[in-house]
């Protein structure tokens, strides 16, 4: 498993990022593309990773998926067992019996006897509930279908959890980059054009004070120093958030949580994700697609059918006879035998010998007269549990389970429809918020010349010209930090909502990650692919790129 994870991670490290279907023009913010490991509070190596690689590793190594795969094997074994209920059992063995003391004869007399017997052989035996043998495989078949649907549900839920954890890591990286940018505007000694050719705010104020500037700047410098300390404390918290998010992602991927994971996607842009065309469909059409695709609904439908079959079993159980058949063949012998008669010689020549019988039996502990033996018996019986009241209770219990299964399925239908509507709404809302936040930071060409950056540069220039106070620049830096935070939040949640939309539609993992492993085929046959709609109506080509 470790080798698989290492190969996938190495491939992810050198894989070229595909161009996503996002139609938003790529902005060019000042956020760093990839903070180095030392800047996130860790001196050792970091493991490079991409979202696609993380999803592949999860499908191969996640323990929840492994448990669901084992549950499928268990359900298939239960189906095989149900199909064998009508077959006879074969028994081979030996039975030895030794008795000493009182025993009752067939006539009812109590006698004292010492005896031994031995049987060696065997044969088929058959005793079963007819209704279970006939209808039990139908229930087991539905439970197997439910387990396979639960396996697909676990796959999708795990991919969603991994994607959420991955987006949390990206969110922490964007927060770190935003804080570093804010600290750069506050503390950098390097003049930049974005600051009107000036240093950061704290060095700028310090220089003004050192050359004998206004005394009022002393209080301004103290306020700027407090701002710097607050941002550094915020960075410590951001590093903690990054390490915690990375450890959670490692847990889901069954990797060492002490070694941080470093995503390779550029944090300045929304992550390229498939499924752009799904976002353009109305909610009613998306709900219809989800109803056909979501494995939760297939799982619940199979459980409903299984409980319905169990109701039928409970109703016909007391009506059908139950056979019992036993056949045994083998060798049987025992002892003791009666004492042998005494043959006395004739009293006179030519006379007949005299035979005198001996009462009692010979010594025990010996197996005599061992020879073949055949036993066969067959029976047919009906059974009423608890004089019929037990059967009535069973019927009512199974009917209650059937109603519960129907209610759970209806709740699943409502949940799926709600998730689709919520995901579509979140995609649209976060897209709009991302556009608004971006317009405040960047121009139409994606350059960092939006109103926030322009106001910041003008405030720096006013301080240099002696027309403005440093606190005005500090307010502009705070405003930039707030807008960068809003942009990072909108970018991350836009990515998250797009993935949640794909999840809510119930699209199979192979349309997000190639070669997604499924449950092993039963009896050497290839497992059928789930019948799902993967292309939006009216779209050209597959719905996922």
Image: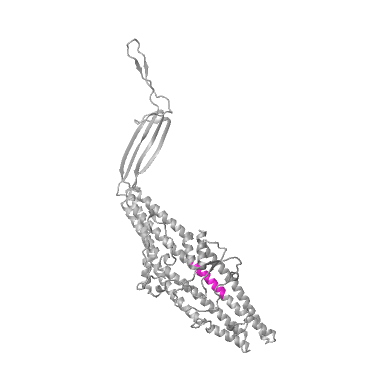
User: Relative to residue 67, is residue 462 drawn left or right?
Assistant: right
Q: Please tell me whether residue 457 is drawn above or below residue 130 in the rendered image.
A: below
Q: Is residue 172 magenta?
A: yes
User: Relative to residue 403, is residue 163 drawn left or right?
Assistant: right
x and y percent of residue 449 in the render?
53, 83
User: Which quadrant would the C terminus be assigned to in this image?
Assistant: bottom left
x and y percent of residue 183 in the render?
60, 77
Q: Please tell me whether residue 361 is drawn above or below residue 90 in the rendered image.
A: above
Q: Please tell me whether residue 52 is drawn above or below residue 490 in the rendered image.
A: above
Q: Is residue 288 magenta?
A: no
Identify the residue at horizontal 39%, vertical 52% (top origin): 78
User: Relative to residue 137, is residue 208 drawn left or right?
Assistant: right
> What range of the chain is rendered magenta?
162-177
The picture quadrant where one finds residue 332 is top left
What is the magenta segment's predominant secondary structure? helix
The picture quadrant where one finds residue 179 is bottom right
x and y percent of residue 81 in the render?
38, 50
- Asked if residue 220 can be seen in this view, the reply is no
- Asked if residue 186 can be seen in this view, the reply is yes
Number of marks: 0
Identify the residue at horizontal 34%, vertical 54% (top origin): 138
x and y percent of residue 197 in the render?
61, 84
């Amino acid at each position: 498993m470790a080798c698989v994870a290492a190969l996938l991670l190495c491939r992810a490290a050198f894989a070229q990022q595909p161009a996503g279907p996002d139609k938003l023009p790529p902005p060019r913010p000042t956020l760093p593309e990839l903070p180095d490991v030392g800047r996130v509070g860790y001196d050792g190596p970091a493991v490079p990773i991409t979202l696609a690689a993380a999803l592949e590793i999860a499908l191969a190594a996640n323990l929840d998926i492994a448990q669901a795969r084992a549950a499928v094997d268990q359900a298939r074994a239960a189906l095989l067992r149900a199909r064998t209920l009508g077959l006879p059992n074969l028994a081979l063995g030996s039975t030895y019996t030794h008795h000493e003391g009182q025993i009752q004869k067939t006539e009812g007399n109590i006698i004292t006897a010492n005896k031994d017997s031995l049987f060696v052989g065997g044969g088929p035996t058959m005793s079963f509930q007819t209704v279970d043998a006939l209808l039990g495989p139908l229930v087991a078949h539905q439970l197997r279908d439910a387990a396979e649907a639960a396996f697909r549900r676990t796959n999708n839920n795990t991919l969603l959890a991994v994607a959420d954890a991955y987006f949390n890591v990206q969110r922490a990286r964007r927060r770190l980059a935003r804080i570093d940018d804010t600290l750069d505007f506050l503390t950098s000694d390097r003049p930049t054009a974005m600051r009107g050719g000036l240093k950061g705010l704290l060095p700028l104020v310090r220089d003004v004070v050192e050359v004998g500037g206004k005394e009022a700047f002393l209080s301004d410098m103290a306020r700027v120093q407090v701002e710097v300390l607050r941002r550094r404390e915020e960075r410590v918290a951001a590093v903690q958030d990054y390490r915690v998010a990375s450890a959670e992602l490692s847990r889901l991927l069954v990797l060492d949580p002490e070694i941080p994971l470093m995503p390779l996607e550029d944090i300045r842009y929304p992550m390229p994700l498939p499924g752009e065309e799904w976002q353009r469909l109305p909610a009613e059409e998306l709900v219809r697609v989800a109803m056909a695709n979501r494995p939760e609904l297939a799982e619940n439908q199979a459980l409903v059918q299984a409980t319905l079959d169990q109701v039928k079993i409970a109703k016909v159980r007391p009506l059908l006879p139950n056979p019992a058949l036993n056949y045994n063949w083998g060798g049987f012998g025992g002892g003791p035998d009666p004492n042998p008669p005494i043959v006395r010689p004739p009293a006179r020549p030519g006379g007949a010998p005299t035979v005198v019988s001996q009462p009692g039996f010979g010594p025990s502990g010996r197996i005599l007269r061992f020879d073949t033996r055949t036993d066969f018996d067959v029976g047919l019986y009906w059974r009423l549990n608890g004089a019929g009241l037990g059967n009535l209770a069973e019927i009512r219990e199974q009917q209650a389970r059937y109603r519960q299964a129907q209610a759970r399925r209806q709740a699943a239908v409502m949940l799926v429809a709600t998730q689709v509507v919520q995901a579509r709404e979140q995609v649209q809302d976060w897209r709009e918020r991302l556009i608004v936040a971006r317009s405040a930071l960047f121009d139409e060409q994606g350059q960092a010349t939006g109103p926030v950056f322009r106001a910041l540069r003008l405030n720096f220039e006013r301080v240099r010209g002696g027309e403005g106070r440093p606190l005005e620049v500090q307010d502009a830096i705070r405003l930039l930090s707030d807008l960068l935070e809003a942009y990072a939040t909108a970018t991350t949640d836009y990515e998250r909502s797009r993935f949640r939309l794909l999840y809510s539609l119930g699209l199979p993992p192979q349309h997000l990650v190639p070669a997604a492993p499924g449950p092993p085929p039963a009896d050497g046959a290839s497992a059928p692919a789930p019948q799902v709609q993967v292309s939006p109506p009216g779209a050209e080509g597959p719905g996922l790129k």
